[in-house]
Structures are given as structure tokens and as C-alpha cells.
Image (spheres, grey):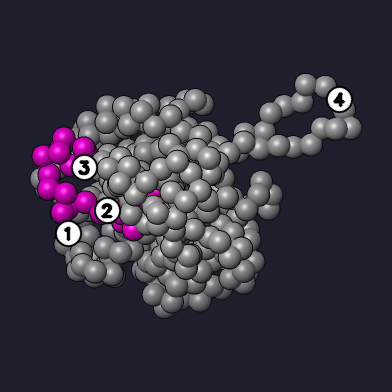
Amino acid sequence: MPGSKILGSAHYVPSDIVTNDDLAKIMDTSDAWIQSHTGIKTRHMSLKGENTSDLATKAAQLALDKADLAAEDIDLIIVTTFTPDGLAPSTAALVQRNLNANKAWAYDIMTACSGFIFGLSTADKFLRSGVYQHALVISAEVNSKMMDFTDRTSTVFFGDGAGAVVLTADMQGNGFLAGEDMHTIGNADVVHSGRIPPLQELSAENYPKTDAFVQMGRDVFNEVTTLIPQHIRDFLSSKSLKPSDIDYFIPHQANLRLIEYIAKDLDEPLSKFSTNIIRNGNTSSAGIAIGFDELNQSVNLTGKRVLLTGFGAGFTYGSIFDAILKKVLRALINQ
């Protein structure tokens, strides 16, 4: 059965580091409060004019270098983002231009924090078709541009960053994706961002206005803790596996307390879980992509079982499972 393989991964974060004390200077919060509620110590923010397409382009070029491929080798570019440069052109189209990936067609996926999972699944299907050879999947976010910096309950969580992987078609084997399970639950109230209200009347004063990012923190926590641990158990059970059979978990980097809860519920040690949120904050769809690359670069994942699990605004959630057996892969776990 044809499949796809990951040839290289990389990530990029802006150079500006914002500490909890920095935020405490402009809003009613403190380092102690933020760490106790979120586990976050620092986050990177794009304060030098880098937009989402810029972060995505830099992560993509680094991933191409790791894969020893040129931009002109790429047939498909998928960018997952909750914070695009704009509605048109797509952020993926801007990345395609920036890379001079002239053979590639490109588009965005917007499933918020589950984006990297949805993007990998989508690219895998294109490569399995036999029509395309190489694809870039990039998750990139500049969350800071959508924040209300008077809202301490939301803003303290978020940071900016990007992660990318290069995939290639594998017509000889099953590829990296050994199983997947994705879900969508339409919920417009728990998390929303970028809403533009429709017109109430025809007027020369009308001009598009967008709202800042908003999340109902307690509702998000309750939704995740209710759904995600059981989702993971059910998904693994469908593959005749248990949580203890997984070597590494890469969950969405929403909140360290949430990751701790999931680990405890699954009765697995926190040491098996990616926790880049402590340094990077919640980078939405980029968090899993960054966590994958960090694991890929630091651990020999050959023969390891990795699970990637995403959950976020929408409400979307899902997991991708891989037993990394092929020498071309350094690492993989996706959700």
C-alpha cells in the first residue's frame, strides 16, 4: 500500500522573548499567577514586523535544508494557521512565493490548534494518490497580533512560532501514518477570534472591524479534560494498543496544567510528553509541529511509537499514530 514518509523537520520562533514579568508591567497579572495557572515562563513574540508567512517561510526553508531538497522539488504546500496574514492571498501562497517553489500549489487549513494533525493527514492523502512526490506541511502562528492585552485570562497563554515538515511519497511501503482519528464539534462560543460582523445597514461609515482573540478558559479546560484522555484511549485501543505502549506523546501545547492532567489520567509519566509550552507559550497549531521537531532533533526515534494529539478552537480534536520503523524517518508523532 502506498504511503508517505517524513524526510526532514524544523521550527522557527521570533527572537523577542516576553517574560511573565514583562506582561505584568502592562496588565494586572504576575509571574506567580501565570506559572501557577499555566506553567508558562516565557513566550516568543513577533515584535519586529514578522508576519505568519515570514515565520512559515523560515521554518519551511530550514526543513527543506534538513531534507536535502530544493523548493522547486515541492509539489504541494499546506499551511495550517489560526492567524493568517489575511484572507487573501492565502498564507500558503505567500510562502510559495517566498520560497520560489514554482511547481507547488498551495493553500491554508484553519482548524486552530489541531492544524498540524489535519495538515499531515491531508498531505499524506495527496502523496498516497501517486500524483505528487513531495509536500511541505507548515504550522505557523503570530497569535500576538490577535490578542487583547488588557485580557489577562487569554493573552498570558500565547506566543508565536512555526514548525514544518517535508514529506515524500512512499510507493513501496505503508508510510509514517499508521492510524488517525479526527473530530469536529461546532462551538462558536468557547474560543473565537477574527470575527467580522455582518452589516446592519448600508452606510458610507461601514468599514470591516475584527475582534480580538477570546477564550472561555474554564470551558476549554472542561471540554479538553472530558474528551481528550478518553479519545486517546479509544484511538489506541482501535490499534490494539494502550497508552503505556506509546514511547512519546506530543499533545497540543495549550496549558502545562492540561498536559499534566492528561498524563495523570492516562497514568503515564510526564517525561513522555512534549512540554515546549513552558518556553514558547501556547503557539496554537505550531505547538505540535515545534514539539515534533524538538523531539526529532534530540532523540533517535527509529522504532519508537509516537502519538500526536491536537485539540483546539472550533472545537476540533484528533490524533495521528506512527510506529517509526523506516530509516528515512528520524521521528514522528502527530495528532
**Residue at 85% across, 32% down:** 205
- Magenta residues span 260-288
For the residues labelled 1 and 4, say whether their Cβ atoms are less than 8 Å apart. no
Q: Work out whether 136 lies above or below 225.
A: below
Q: CA distance from mark 2 to mark 3?
A: 10 Å
| Residue 266 at x, y percent in the picture | 15, 38
Left-right relation of 183 to 160 = left
Amino acid type, callout 4: Leu
Q: Which mark is residue 275?
A: 2
Label 3, on which residue?
Answer: 260
Label 2 secondary element: loop
Q: Which mark is residue 148?
A: none
Circle 2 Cα neighbour tier, 10 Å, few/some/many (<14 / 14–19 / ≥20): many
Residue that carries the numbered disc 1 in the rendered image: 304
Q: Residue furthest right?
A: 204
Question: Which residue is more in the foreground, 258 or 65?
Answer: 258
Residue 202 circle label: 4
Q: CA distance from mark 4 to mark 3?
A: 51 Å
Kindly state the secondary structure of the residue where label 3 is placed.
helix
